Image (tube, rainbow, N blue to C red):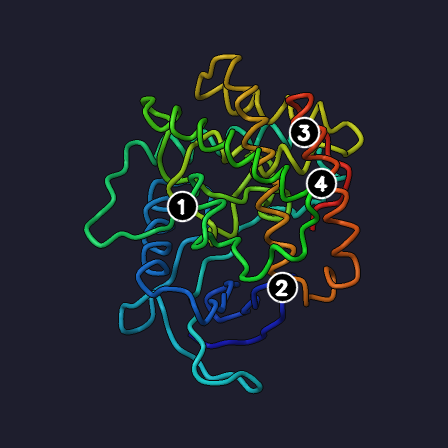
Amino acid sequence: MEVIGVWRLPSLTRAVFALETGEGRHVLRLHPGDARSDELQSLLRWLEALSGACLPVPRPRATLRGEWLAEVALEGLPGPQRCSLLSWLPGKALTPEELTSEHAWAMGNLLARLHDFALRWQAPPGFVRPSLDADGLFGEDSPYASPGSEEYFSPELREAMHLVELRTRAQCHRLRGQPGAWGLVHGDLIAKNCLFGDDGASALDFDNCAWGCFLYDLAPATLQFTGLPGGEALARALWSGYTARRSLSPARRYDLETLVAARLVASCRWLVANRHAPVVRDRLETLLAQRSLTLRDYLGSGFVRRRSEML
């Protein structure tokens, strides 16, 4: 494959590049050095299965040796870097403020299609992905964990996070035993991880895909919509797009609020883990204080009404 041009794509925490080649455009993703090889191989296997079923997701490209992961040496980075090559998807990227109810409906419907396939798909031997159950969201081995993070949380925020955790654990325990409620989830389907076109939405960035409650997959976008002008309409459209394909009782909509709060707790931990990033560093204290107010409001009302921006 002849590489004609390379340019960096926007990403806060991961190196992502666009490659213009003689065979078209592709995406090159550099994976974190501490990522487990078996989890990365499983991620790419999952994308291969989804794309093979004609779902709108990136398809991994194998190397000449038939492998999905390769090692490259890059100037300025120590040692070889693991990377994968993915197909380029057509579509338009939109900011959360640019989304319409039609876009939100398409996001919900896409999630339902992904979940329907996840229920039919049989994971092969050796398939390993983390869990986004309560332990995966709040535990020491969570992808959102950050050693020493407690010192950054006020007593009020720590208490609110603990109470949300208790509610989430009870809900996950209940939902896990229900048919069709648990499987592989995207884990981070928000505006920046979607492309939009005439055929609906496509999903990008499956780095957070995990075993979890399907209902949780609606939480990231619902949280992102909350606080936007017209956000309630977007959240309704997301729910409508999902339930048009996968029927849910109205009670599940209230269950979703707990998972939205859980997502906000994960966001607090993520902020601390990325506190040295320029976009976080100078605003960490303010963002955590705003999230504390939001969580305390949720505990009193049962609804999440976001008071701060999402990064």
In the image, is residue 168 above or below residue 142?
above
- Disc 2 to disc 1, how far (Cα)? 24 Å
Task: In the rendered structure, find residue 210 and report the number of the disc placed on it.
Answer: 1
**Residue 31 position within the rendered picture, expressed as x and y whole percent measured from the top left:** 47, 67
- The disc, 2 or 1, on the residue closer to the chain's N-terminal end is 2
Q: Which disc is residue 304 wearing?
A: 3
Q: Nearer the viewer, residue 227 or 5?
A: 227
Q: Quadrant of residue 116?
A: top left
Q: Relative to residue 18, is residue 265 depicted above or below?
A: above
Q: Position of residue 107 (x, y in %)?
A: 56, 34
Left or right placement of residue 222 versus residue 133 in this view: right
Give the crowd class for mark 2: few <14, some 14-19, many >=20 residues within 10 Å.
Answer: some
Q: Nearer the viewer, mark 4 or mark 3?
A: 4
Q: Residue at x 51, y 14 (%)?
A: 251
Alpha-carbon span between mark 2 and mark 3: 32 Å
Query: Compared to 239, does 146 lie above or below?
Result: below
Distance from Cα at disc 2 to Cα at disc 4: 32 Å
Among numbered discs 1 and 4, the one appearing first in the sequence = 1
Write the residue at 45% across / 16% down.
247
Q: Is residue 2 left or right of residue 5?
A: left
Q: Which residue is mark 4?
A: 292
**For residue 83, which quarter of the picture?**
bottom left
- Which residue has dot 2 on it? 9
Q: Nearer the viewer, mark 2 or mark 3?
A: 3
